[in-house]
Amino acid sequence: MISRSLACRRIVAPSLRNSSRSSLSQFGGCWGYTSQAASSLLQAFEPSVHRTCRVEDEYADVDWDNLGFGLMPTDYMYQMKCTENGTFERGQVRPYGNVELSPSAGVLNYGQGLFEGLKAHRKENGSLLLFRPDQNAIRMKVGADRMCMPAPSVEQFVDAVRETALANKRWVPPPGKGSLYMRPLLMGSGPVLGLAPAPEFTFLIYASPVRNYFKEGTAPLNLYIEDEFDRASRGGTGGVKSITNYAPVLKALARAKSRGFSDVLYLDSVVKNNLEEVSSCNIFVLKGNVLSTPATNGTILSGITRKSIIEISRDLGYQVEERAVPVEELMEAEEVFCTGTAVVVAPVGSVTSKDKRIEFKTGAQTACGRLYDILVGIQTGHIKDKYGWVVEIN
Ligand SMILES: *Cc1c(COP(=O)(O)O)cnc(C)c1O
């Protein structure tokens, strides 16, 4: 999947060590090398080779028509450290590769970590579009506070995302073929033994080209209502993107998948009758003109896609309600769909609770389809962004 042959043997290593946007951009649109080859190239710097750069280097050697949601490492990642005084030093773009951690790192021992996820789309004119990156930055700050970590400022976060996207530009799929998914991480990287926040924190961003999150592609999802495992509880961390929320539900997810379902729909942990969300996305229920979604009261991740879909729906004339949504209401819904950066707006074809399976309207002429088209239209630059959500970078 990843080209080992280097059409363009030009190296950015020297400037990479203390990279800045200007030092990277001076190489124009066709610099870069494969991650596997990065370390050897670092040692074999040849300043003259950049003249051999070819047009094909605009794109990495990827089968763009068969992208899923698997990890495909790209050339560069971003790294920024923060010491005990709570300030992040200047970060840098560096070749993609493993990170070294103390065995007693806070993240390894006590799960002190957060993640984020956002996409860069390539426009026909060659520039890249980010969708509301400031919202990811703000969410990371909120999560960091909950997890006793310092967070990068909104400006540091957005700059880091911008640098990471541009450095990996040749991995951004052609228009209409997917996007570059970027995964910011914040973790307690310093050593601790007694339970306490780590003495050092690391902010990282890596990236991977992606297309559809579910193996179903854009086909409707079949969800399974989980009645044994809870995803989040009152007073817990369900409302932030803590890494500790995800491993505990792998079991429910694996079990649902083994039974042929696409994903799990979790219920609240108190009365076990109100919808919460799906493993990595929020849920909406439509009946008539009323679009309902569970309120974000601490156990539900406050999705940026959720927030955007609420706003778009209201502008389209739907009555949007954020409140408790009981299972009975889901059972009577006309349409159900999920929202998230990875899944975008995904139609739900059926929900199964114990032995009862309910089906919903999908396909053309659905609210879900219309909302998908508008959201993706804005994200890819095909629909005018009257909201000011899209950030164009080049
Ligand atoms: C990330 C995530 C979402 C979706 O959030 P977006 O900002 O829309 O990507 C929803 N639920 C969970 C549990 C998540 O981790």
Image (cartoon, helix red, strand yellow):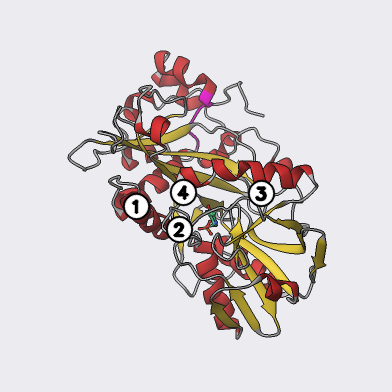
Q: Is residue 128 left or right of residue 162?
A: right
Q: Nearer the viewer, mark 1 or mark 4?
A: 1
3D distance between C-alphas at marks 3 and 4: 16 Å
Magenta region:
30-35
- Quick one: label 1 or label 3, which is nearer the N terminus? 1
Residue type at numbered disc 1? Arg
3D distance between C-alphas at marks 1 and 3: 28 Å
3D distance between C-alphas at marks 1 and 4: 15 Å
In percent of width and height, residue 220 lies at 77, 60
- At horizontal 44% and vertical 47% (from top left) the residue drawn is 242
In percent of width and height, residue 209 lies at 59, 42
Q: Is mark 4 within 8 Å of ligand 1?
A: yes
Q: Secondary structure at mark 4?
A: loop
Give residue 213's mark. Answer: 3
Q: Is residue 10 left or right of residue 319?
A: left
Give residue 239's mark. Answer: 2
